[in-house]
Image: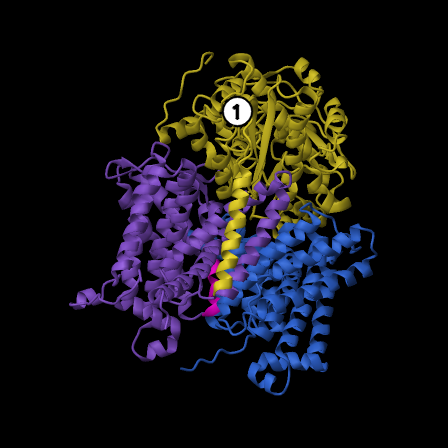
Chain colours: A yellow, B blue, C purple
């Protein structure tokens, strides 16, 4: 019995030692940015390149510019494993770190975003859920601390329908066409349904819904039904992780043409098409930023980060779609902080001050060019009332080696989406007893 | 009444309207069932010989697939990668027997079950710590184009999987029936005490069973890995094998196959024809409910050993 | 010396049958309660209260529920997550349909609804046993989650299927939603858990508890001596689901505040099962020890690994965490298959004779 106890005591000692060692010396003139990521768990393969992109961009800012206007970035990753409990734990652990607390959280999971909305609002820390999370959070009057630029799922759905319409020869030609939606049967996958149903009513196409249970290892039944029975003109997909590559394989197995199969922006990375092999050639997906490593910003990342041995991932994976999304995420965070510094002064800022930076964010063409991202994404402007920006998306296609941009940028149908956002947000406000705040320009 | 009609008769009318499509779905389902059976087999082998409900079987599939694809990516030819991975699985079997099973001998079944869940965590962590958590493509040269026979659509990959599974079962049957080791395994499965008293070493037998389960896991890992790409999610297919397993009976090798076929066909037909009425994505729970219904009729599964209880 | 029963004489049957017969035990419990009710709310940081104490207490409650079913009545179940989800969605529907209802009433009603669902899914246990039953309970797990995910009525037609808990009061004090303070949430959950633990402890000492244990030890023998398996098994399912339902409701309302059905996936079921096995089957104390172990261990491991200079390798830290967790589970099972509660009991036996073991 004794030796066992000693063993336990030893273990406890090791753990305690770890906790003590953790109390690193505090730095004063730095901005702390937490990074909720997942490099493990069911969606780890997708979380990895994204996390690398974020880390590399922050390191680039530190190494090339010496921080944001001289304020160095200190960031810390916390692995959520795409698990809501872990995400909440990470949030609570990191929110008070650094001299001024956490600058902003990007949960990288729709589920965790939902779990954090109230907490972050109460703690006055902005949540930046870039192209995921709660769609109606775009309504800044009800969600003062939540931002989901450049576009939410609802906007994206309208943009994709615009592309489909263009291929068919115009919105009026959609009448009678069959469109199938294959979606991850969760909060995330269900987001576009109301929008698509509304568009169905407006343009007279026929929408059929095909949920796939998490994690989506088995889709034979779904695809037999789509490919042999429903025989739609177009298939849209709201998938994530292994579900995407499985869907592509099963679609190929029933002979559905890849040119008519469009994923959303979480269903269009190298991880989704590579496991499917040649079957994936021709598969399309939406995207809101560039793919590939041909922009000046990538050259800087390779020069200032990878050449110094600071790279988070493998050099050859710089420029993958999800890597670039991580870079985009980090870039918007940095620009928001820069904007907040213009308002509140160049010093480490609190979450509340950085919120102001987000609300006044104005990424112009010129600014994107300075950042080495000209054409990488389109300009983006947020305001107190509009936390989304209604950014455009384009369609990319996989050629077996890389993703190619094959379309123009499609702006979402804001006239359709914004009233839905407003209605949903006001319903939320009523349920929660929130009085929508006033915004200067409406 | 209308609801009843919608749930009971409408899908049946759907089947009658399109008999060919129904056959297609049925065949597709049977093929999926074969893939489930591949995983369920590993469970049965270990349960039969040692009474351990080995929850780690799914993780062993992932573990084996990670090593296999890892070796192949390193440029090792396929046959050598197979042998090397086999060696890894043998080492694993010895380690499990030494470090987990032996100290836990004579513990209640639930304790051993929990221990295998501990092994699950360990293997998931270890495999990914060594090989990383990226998705890796595994190409073993199985053709994937569909073939169409009499307007019925069949997936060639599935056909291939069925052949491999059939071969595996035949080899296992021969091994159990005609080799001394196989006979020893069956003796242990029948009666631990009696087997020990005629001089069959229990720990050796357990090691062998885990080795065999490891091989089955490797084959399942290669097949599923070729289908989905090798990644963490492979370990979750255990959840798809469980209903097949209990439906067939925990102690029966043919049961695993039949269970797999019934579950595969049942869930696909349900998803395609009933899915729309019920809202879709019903496959997962339907498999379990189907298994449960069978169990209500035969509590020990279709081919399981009859449970005789005495006070 | 400090822990001995010599000199403590029982002069009445009531004293002899009390839950805590030794003065030392009573003092110990009083100290723990004092710590939990006074010291922790005063001293613990918000991080500790909201991300460690709250999940710990709620998981302990769910473990208590499962332990009644598995540890006391011997019915292995993997449907805990489904029952917790039932409680959460029942509470949400009740709280939004009757905004004025006191949250305590909401909790009790949602527990009762879960109990009814539990009885329904417990029916197969009359025929199916052991691992077959365990797998059959997965039917409940998958079906219930699918149901709440699929039928928009359960989420009040929210587009995403996420329910977010409104602010509700218990006896006039807000205990859920974002208006409630963390301390209020913690104290409320603590009171619920204390009361339900007390009830469980007593239930296991009553006729119903004894019939559960008889069924667990051998159901045929129990049937022969006159215990009805039907009543015993179904009451076990009902009580167990009642506890799990309340745990689920607290999880959604007091802890995360917003959940979707997938938050109660099969991982939750397994986690609760770990807790009762590591803590100790058929004990009340074990639920707390097991819950503490499972909730705290990953957090400590993670912190420790990161502290040991693994900041750069978050992925490796996570993998190592899984490996250590797995190894520790096996280690504990080997060292003490009856769980942490048994270790504590052994410790007490030793203390009783200390310092003069004979």
- Whether residue B280 is visible, yes or no, is no
Q: Nearer the viewer, residue A231 or B93?
A: B93
- In which image quadrant can residue B283 be found? bottom right
Residue at 64% across, 31% down: A54
Report whether A428 appears left or right of A173.
Answer: left
Q: Chain of mark 1?
A: A
The residue that mark 1 highlights is: A416
Using the image, determine if residue C10 lies above or below residue A129.
Answer: below
Residue B17 against residue B205 in the figure, above or below:
above
Would residue B95 be counted in the magenta stretch? Answer: no
Q: Is residue C146 left or right of residue C65?
A: right
Q: Residue shown at 30%/50% (left/top)?
A: C31
Quarter of the rendering occupied by the C terminus of chain A:
top left
Image location (x, y in percent) of residue C41:
33, 39
Secondary structure predominantly adopted by residues drawn in magenta: helix
Location of residue C278 with respect to A204 vertically, above or below: below
Give the tally of numbered discs: 1
Relative side of C197 to B1, left or right = left
When asked about the image quadrant of residue C152, the answer is top left
> What span is in magenta?
C129-140
Name the residue: 43% across, 59% down: C279
x and y percentages locating residue A86 in the rendered image: 51, 43
What is the x, y in percent for residue C270? 49, 56
Residue C75 image offset from top left, x and y in percent: 42, 66
């Amino acid at each position: 019995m004794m030796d066992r106890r000693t063993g336990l005591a030893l273990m406890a000692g090791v753990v305690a030692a770890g906790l003590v060692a953790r109390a690193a010396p505090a730095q004063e003139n730095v901005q702390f940015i937490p990074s909720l990521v997942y490099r493990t768990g069911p969606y780890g393969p997708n979380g990895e390149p994204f996390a690398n992109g974020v880390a590399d961009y922050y390191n680039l800012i530190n190494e090339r510019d010496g921080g944001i206007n001289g304020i160095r970035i200190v960031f810390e990753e916390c692995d959520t494993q795409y698990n809501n409990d872990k995400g909440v734990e990470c949030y609570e652990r990191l929110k008070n770190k650094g001299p001024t607390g956490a600058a902003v959280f990007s949960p990288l999971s729709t589920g965790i975003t939902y779990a954090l909305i109230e907490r972050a609002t109460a703690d006055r820390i902005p949540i930046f859920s870039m192209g995921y999370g709660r769609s109606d959070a775009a309504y800044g009057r009800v969600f003062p601390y939540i931002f989901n630029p450049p576009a939410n799922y609802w906007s994206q759905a309208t943009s994709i329908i615009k592309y489909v319409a263009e291929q068919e020869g115009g919105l009026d030609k959609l009448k009678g066409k069959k469109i199938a939606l294959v979606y991850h049967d969760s909060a995330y996958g269900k987001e576009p349904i109301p929008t698509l149903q509304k568009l169905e009513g407006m343009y007279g196409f026929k929408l059929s819904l095909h949920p796939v249970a998490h994690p989506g290892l088995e889709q034979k039944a779904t695809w037999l039904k789509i490919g042999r029975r429903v025989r739609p003109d177009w298939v849209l997909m709201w998938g994530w992780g292994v579900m995407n590559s499985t869907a592509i394989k099963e679609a190929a197995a029933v002979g559905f043409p890849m040119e008519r199969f469009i994923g959303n922006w979480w269903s269009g990375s190298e991880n989704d098409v590579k496991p499917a092999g040649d079957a994936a050639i021709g598969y399309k997906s939406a995207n809101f930023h560039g793919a590939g490593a041909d922009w000046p910003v990538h050259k800087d990342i390779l020069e200032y980060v990878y050449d110094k041995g600071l790279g988070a991932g493998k050099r050859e994976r710089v420029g993958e779609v999800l890597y670039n999304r991580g870079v985009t995420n980090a870039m918007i965070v940095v620009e928001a902080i820069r904007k907040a510094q213009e308002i509140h002064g160049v010093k480490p800022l609190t979450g509340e001050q950085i919120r102001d930076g987000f609300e006044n964010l104005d990424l112009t063409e010129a600014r994107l060019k300075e950042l080495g991202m000209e054409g990488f994404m389109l300009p983006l402007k947020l305001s107190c009332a509009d936390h989304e920006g209604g950014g455009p998306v384009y369609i990319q296609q996989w050629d077996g080696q890389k993703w190619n941009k094959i379309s123009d940028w499609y702006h979402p149908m804001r006239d359709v989406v914004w009233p839905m956002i407003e209605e949903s947000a006001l319903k939320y406000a009523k349920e929660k007893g929130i009085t929508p705040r006033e915004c200067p320009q409406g | 009444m209308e609801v009843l009609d919608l749930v009971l008769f409408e899908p049946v009318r759907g089947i009658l309207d399109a008999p060919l499509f129904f056959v297609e779905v049925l065949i597709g389902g049977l093929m999926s069932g074969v893939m489930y059976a591949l995983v369920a087999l590993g469970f049965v082998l270990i349960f039969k010989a040692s009474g351990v409900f080995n929850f780690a079987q799914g993780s062993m599939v992932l573990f084996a697939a990670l090593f296999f694809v890892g070796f192949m990516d390193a440029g090792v030819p396929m046959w050598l990668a197979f042998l090397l991975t086999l060696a890894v699985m043998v080492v694993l079997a010895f380690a499990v027997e030494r470090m987990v099973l032996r100290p836990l001998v004579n513990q209640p079944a639930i304790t051993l079950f929990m221990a295998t869940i501990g092994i699950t965590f360990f293997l998931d962590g270890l495999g990914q710590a060594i090989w990383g958590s990226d998705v890796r493509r595994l190409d073993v040269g199985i053709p994937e184009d569909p073939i169409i026979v009499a307007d019925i659509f069949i997936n060639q990959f599935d056909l291939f999987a069925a052949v491999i599974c059939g071969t595996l079962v035949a080899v296992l049957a021969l091994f159990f029936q005609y080799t001394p080791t196989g006979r020893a395994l069956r003796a242990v499965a029948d009666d631990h005490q009696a087997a020990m008293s005629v001089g069959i070493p229990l720990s050796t037998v357990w090691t062998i069973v885990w080795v065999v389960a490891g091989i089955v896991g490797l084959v399942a890992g290669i097949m599923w890995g070729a289908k989905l790409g090798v990644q963490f999610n492979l370990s979750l297919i255990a959840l798809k094998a469980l209903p097949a397993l209990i439906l067939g009976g925990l102690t029966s090798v043919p049961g695993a196959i039949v269970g797999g076929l019934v579950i595969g066909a049942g869930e696909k037909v349900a998803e395609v024809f009933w899915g729309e009425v019920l809202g879709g994505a019903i496959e997962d729970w339907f498999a379990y409910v189907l298994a449960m219904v069978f169990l209500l009729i035969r509590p020990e599964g279709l081919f399981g050993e009859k449970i005789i209880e005495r006070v | 010396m400090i822990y001995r029963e010599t000199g403590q004489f029982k002069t009445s049957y009531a004293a002899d049958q009390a839950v805590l017969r030794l003065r030392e035990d009573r003092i110990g419990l009083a100290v723990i309660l004092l710590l939990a009710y006074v010291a922790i709310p005063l001293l613990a940081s918000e991080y500790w209260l909201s991300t460690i104490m709250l999940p710990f207490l709620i998981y302990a409650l769910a473990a208590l529920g499962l332990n009644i079913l598995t540890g006391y009545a011997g019915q292995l179940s993997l449907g805990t997550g489904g029952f917790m989800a039932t409680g959460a969605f029942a509470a949400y529907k009740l709280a939004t349909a009757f905004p004025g209802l006191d949250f305590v009433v909401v909790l009790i009603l949602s527990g009762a609804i879960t109990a009814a669902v539990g009885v329904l899914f417990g029916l197969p246990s009359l025929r199916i046993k052991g691992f077959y039953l365990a797998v059959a309970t997965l039917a409940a797990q998958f079906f219930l989650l699918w149901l709440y995910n699929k039928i928009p009525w359960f989420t009040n037609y929210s587009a995403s299927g996420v329910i977010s808990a409104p602010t509700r009061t218990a006896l006039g004090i807000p205990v859920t939603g974002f208006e409630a303070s963390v301390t209020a949430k913690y104290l409320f959950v603590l009171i619920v858990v204390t009361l339900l633990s007390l009830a469980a402890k007593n239930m296991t000492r009553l006729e119903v508890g004894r019939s559960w244990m008889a069924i667990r030890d051998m159901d045929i023998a129990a049937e022969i001596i006159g215990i009805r398996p039907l009543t015993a098994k179904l009451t076990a399912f009902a009580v167990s689901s009642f506890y799990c339902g309340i745990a689920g409701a607290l999880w959604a309302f007091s802890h995360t505040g917003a959940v979707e059905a997938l938050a109660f996936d099969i991982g939750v079921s397994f986690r609760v099962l770990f807790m009762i096995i590591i803590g100790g089957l058929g004990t009340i104390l074990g639920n707390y020890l097991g819950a503490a172990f499972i909730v705290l261990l990953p957090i400590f491991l993670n912190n420790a690994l990161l502290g040991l200079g693994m900041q750069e390798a978050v992925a490796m830290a996570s993998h190592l965490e899984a490996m250590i967790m797995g190894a520790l589970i096996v280690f504990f099972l080997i060292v003490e298959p009856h769980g942490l509660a048994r270790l504590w009991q052994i410790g007490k036996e030793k203390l009783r004779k200390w310092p003069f073991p004979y």
